Image (cartoon, rainbow, N blue to C red):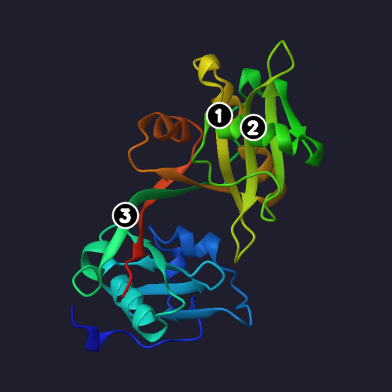
Amino acid sequence: MQATTLLPRTADLFDQGLERQAGAALLRFGAARQRPADRISWSGQGAAAWLDDARGHLWCVGEPDPAAGLVLRAAQGRPEQVREFTGPRGTVGQVRRHLPVTDVVEWVFRWTLEAPPLHPVEERVIVLDASHHGELLDFLNEHSPAHSTGPGSSDVILWAGIRGTDGQLVACGALSSLRDSGAPLMASVATDARQRGQGLGAALTSWLTRYAVHRYGFCTLWQLADNTPAERLYDRLGYRNEDPCVSARLAMR
């Protein structure tokens, strides 16, 4: 792939019908169909990309080779704005031929349109409000230090949790939203390590999924590619597994 053959910028992410294909759910759910006035995007020949300018993050879907072309096009055309990217699995190898990349992480973008079967522990799930943010932060820092979403985040729709017999949190999780489209995104599900094996995480995940499906018609989440227990749980809950992705930072140029 030569940098001189990269695809031109276009105005419409949805002009190919790419969002209807398997492996393009991130486009289907992650990008608003009505194009925001300030959104910078590219598409063409089997790939589409759009820039989250606030984060300097480029989102790409489609086939790896044309998606990598869009990453390079964006990075070369807007070097001060494009600092990291997410694309289909295989994109990094193509980008690395032209630009150095670091912090490579493989993910799966998963989604469901169906509410899962009721979990018996769901009756213990409660909604947590702003008065619980300090408690939530302490819990996440202890039991999930790498949590993706924290209390007080503007993207969070709600927090939910489960308490033990002593009234202390033993599990928590958030229903957040994807920045561009506002689609519901499950995030920061954590369980007290001393309480694992009791189905608390499964119950909370099931409850959050049910809430999102009933309110929005679907739910989405990100799963680390090597997280086998999470993969089994999401399979049981009916989450589709068609969108293997990879994220990386563009090294200093």
Residue 56 or residue 36, whichever sits in front: 56
Task: Check the image and report above or below for 75 versus 230.
Answer: below
| Crowd rating for badge 3 (residues with CA inside 10 Å; few <14, some 14–19, many 20+) | some
Residue 104 - label: 3
Q: Position of residue 176 (x, y in %)?
A: 64, 49
Question: Which one is nearer the viewer's eye here, 139 or 121?
Answer: 139
Q: Are marks 1 and 2 in contact (CB under 8 Å)?
A: yes
Residue at coordinates 36% horizontally, 73% vertically from top-left?
47
Q: CA distance from mark 3 to mark 1?
A: 25 Å
The residue that label 2 is drawn on is 138
> Could you say which quadrant of the image residue 21 lies in?
bottom left
Relative side of 20 to 7, left or right: right
> In terms of sequence position, does the residue under pointer 3 or pointer 1 come before the other?
3
Q: CA distance from mark 3 to mark 2?
A: 28 Å
Q: Residue 246 appears at what percent x and percent y?
A: 34, 56
Is residue 238 visible to the viewer in this orientation of the structure?
yes
- Residue carrying label 1: 142
In the image, farthest residue toward the front? 252
Q: Amino acid at mark 2?
A: Asp
Q: Amino acid at mark 3?
A: Val
Amino acid at circle 1? Glu
Quadrant of res 82 = bottom left
Image-based side of 44 in relation to 99, left or right: right
Q: Quadrant of the N terminus?
A: bottom left
